[in-house]
Amino acid sequence: MTATEHSPARRIKEFVRAVRDSGLYPQNPIVNSATTEPVVWVDGRDHLLFCSNNLLGLSNHPEVRAAAAKALERYGLGSGGSRQMAANIDVHRALEHRIADFLGQEDAICFAAGYMANVGVIPALMKLDRYMQIDQVRTLAPPQPGTAGPSWEIFSEELNHASVVDGVRLAAAEVSRYAHKDMAGLAARLDASAARSKFIVSDGVFSMDGDIAPVPELARLARRHDAVLMIDDAHGVGMLGAGGRGSLEHLGVPPAEIDLQMGTFTKAFGGVGGYVAGDRGLIDFLRISARTYIFSAPLPPAIAAGVAESIDIAEREPWRREKALENAAYFRREVRALGYDTLGSEVHIVPVLIGSEAAAAEATRRLRRLRQDKSALRAFRRAVRGRNAEAHRAHRGFHLGPAGLAAVKFQPQPFGHQRHLDAGHAGQPFDRAAHLRRAGSAIHAGDAPFLDAAGSVRHSAAPSLGFPSRDRR
Ligand SMILES: Cc1ncc(COP(=O)(O)O)c(C=O)c1O
């Protein structure tokens, strides 16, 4: 391949070099242990991990592993194709029934990832009018109401997850983005719309800011405007509500009020895969229209079986979400007491506003490097020292642009983390063996170097570098 001075390949490489030189290229360390544990082994020593999505500690649960192992024995590794070809396996259907039943919805459709669910489902809905022109159904389908205006308009909340944003981009529709949780703004946009069909989509829990959407108001507006309402509750399900059924249950919204309830098995349930649950007719439509369902393989059968087990455990052991939320509340309170802004965080996602992206990247690097006997919270203060004034200036001046809103995101888990945060203060060593017993995890049990390192905690967190969702468009 020749690369002239202005060739795109050359410019791409120069861009990457510039990003590296600026210090912003992600420095994701290689982890030599399960990244679903609160303590991981990186570069020959322990690190506290505050960014795993294994929110309830179920990924390594013995019963989950046993269910997955049994399915692996029976079905092997892969699925053998798409659900519409060979791979419509009983464990997939069982998982769909299980999650629909858990959420109180009629049915569900599963995808290989939550991302695949969003980029498949949103554009699929907008194909309705085109499908109605198909010869075989034209005479059977109801006539389209009116002809003026665009066929579909999507009303998408500005802090929606990137997968929702991408699903919206792929859809054949007008798009209207409304401001974060601004229900008056959304109502005005709906009133002004001339579209024949309206679709409202919002995260239930916002993945970077950790606050909760006004779902009851969204449901009221959807009803009033005869709009389809989809809630992406990837972070709510398993974590919020008395039964762990997510932001709907937390806010007292009956499941039938939401047309499509999207979620992922990657977070509270400790596995992989995504789903959309709702009315049976809508789910049936998605099976024949969502391209990521039709043209892509589903999640592996062993994962489907393991996830179904996780849902059972999450349902019968509410203490897991209670403890994870308690640890997050503790971390949020302590970080706020140190003078940091945690944005609108109300749940297990705790962003800590740092300021510029470079400062956030540097804070992350320092947190990884720190090795000291003080508590993790003190380590945190050292890592972000001097950054907060900049962050506050940027936050107050939001209109100046998104560059000053980079945050580092923390997600404490149910096991250990409060002790980890405090251990330095209390002078307690970290008892890894006890921790592993509590976590029901045997995965590191034979890992001698790991166990050797258990004598004291090195209070060094390895948080994810989270660019706030405002930056991600
Ligand atoms: C709100 C939200 N929706 C969807 C997804 C995508 O889920 P998955 O990781 O299963 O692809 C995420 C993942 O972070 C998310 O936070």
Image (cartoon, grey):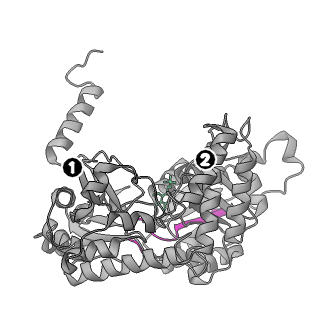
Judged left or right of residue 354, residue 177 is right
Residue bounds of the magenta highlight: 194-211
Front-lying residue, 255 or 220: 255
* Residue pointed to by mark 2: 69
Q: Position of residue 298 (x, y in %)?
A: 63, 44
Q: Position of residue 94 (x, y in %)?
A: 73, 55
Q: What's the magenta bit mostly, secondary-structure-wise?
A: loop
Q: Dot 1, crowdedness within 10 Å: few (<14), some or many (≥20)?
A: some
Q: Position of residue 213 (x, y in %)?
A: 50, 75
Front-lying residue, 301 or 179: 301
Residue at image location 75% in from the left, 64% down from the top:
279
Judged left or right of residue 70, residue 17 is left
User: Magenta stretch containing residue 200, yes or no?
Assistant: yes
* Residue pointed to by mark 1: 24
Task: State the quadrant of the C terminus.
Answer: bottom left
Q: CA distance from mark 1 to mark 2?
A: 40 Å
Picture quarter containing residue 366? bottom left
